[in-house]
Amino acid sequence: MKKANFDFSGQVALITGAASGIGAATAEAFAAAGASVVLADVQVEAGEALTKKLQQRDAKAIFVKADMSIESDVKGMVQTAVQTFGRLDIAYNNAGIEGTAADVVECSNEIWDRTLNINLRGVFWCMKYEIPEMLKVGGGAIVNCSSIAGVVGFNAMPAYVASKHGVIGLTKTTALDYANRGIRVNAVCPGVIQTPMIDRFTHGDKAAMGSLVAGEPMGRLGTADEIASAVLWLSSDNAGFVTGHSLVADGGWVAR
């Protein structure tokens, strides 16, 4: 499959949850397209290793340790991006956790709070501090990571599903608030993608993985690179009239 060509030269892109999975693939894609890249994650070793790899490819990249459930970390992450590269043009607010499987009765307050704090409040804090910096340079593009769990329900995942539905609502209202101020805000909704999160979900069980594949109309799982391509498109001038949109990239999962 031929990949789309993007040019983000002179722009600064911030990616949260950048140490692995979709976040890592997106950081690599932005770097390959010429952007200066800020990788943020709580996984320090993996994040620093990827940053070093990008730097060895002559990319401008830094790593920032940041926990999306801590407001001061989020604020500091954005400040570091601007202090290092002088501006902020693009943000992919990707960091998230799946929580622990449990129905609404069995879901503990701790699971609920941790999942919502990272997946939803974290996105809120990211935009709270990203948007003022984008306004200083005349605009920007934000992509928030929701999920197919943001448009349909799943059994035994009340906190995760609620958080991802919330991301879509937050994306829409923020897009409206800044539609005439040069900032586009969209969401990407990945389906079942081959990432460490799916490995944790299946616990390496071949039958469980087979069930996920069987549920995909395309007959395969998606790749992190495919979601990265969607994020880059939403961040590019090619999507210049797109805002408040939730782009579902799921191999047809929710079309049935």
Image (cartoon, rainbow, N blue to C red):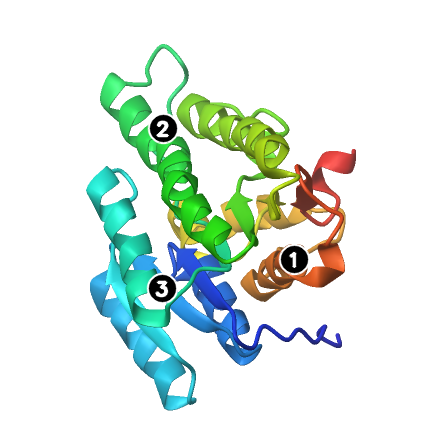
Q: Is residue 87 left or right of residue 230?
A: left
Residue 192's x, y, as percent? 58, 47
Mark 1 residue element: helix
The residue carrying mark 3 is 39
The residue carrying mark 1 is 230
61 shown above or below 101: below
Q: What residue is rendered at 67% in x and 60% in y?
A: 233
Ranked by sequence position, the earlier of labels 2 and 3 is 3
Label 3 Cα neighbours within 10 Å, binned few <14 / some 14-19 / many ≥20:
many
For the residues labelled 2 and 3, the Cα–Cα distance comes to 22 Å
Q: Tag 3: residue type? A: Leu
207 shown above or below 52: above
Ranked by sequence position, the earlier of labels 2 and 1 is 2
Q: Is residue 172 left or right of residue 26?
A: right
Mark 2 residue element: helix
Q: Tag 1: residue type? A: Ala
For the residues labelled 3 and 1, the Cα–Cα distance comes to 18 Å
The answer to whether marks 3 and 1 mark residues whose Cβ atoms lie closer than 8 Å is no
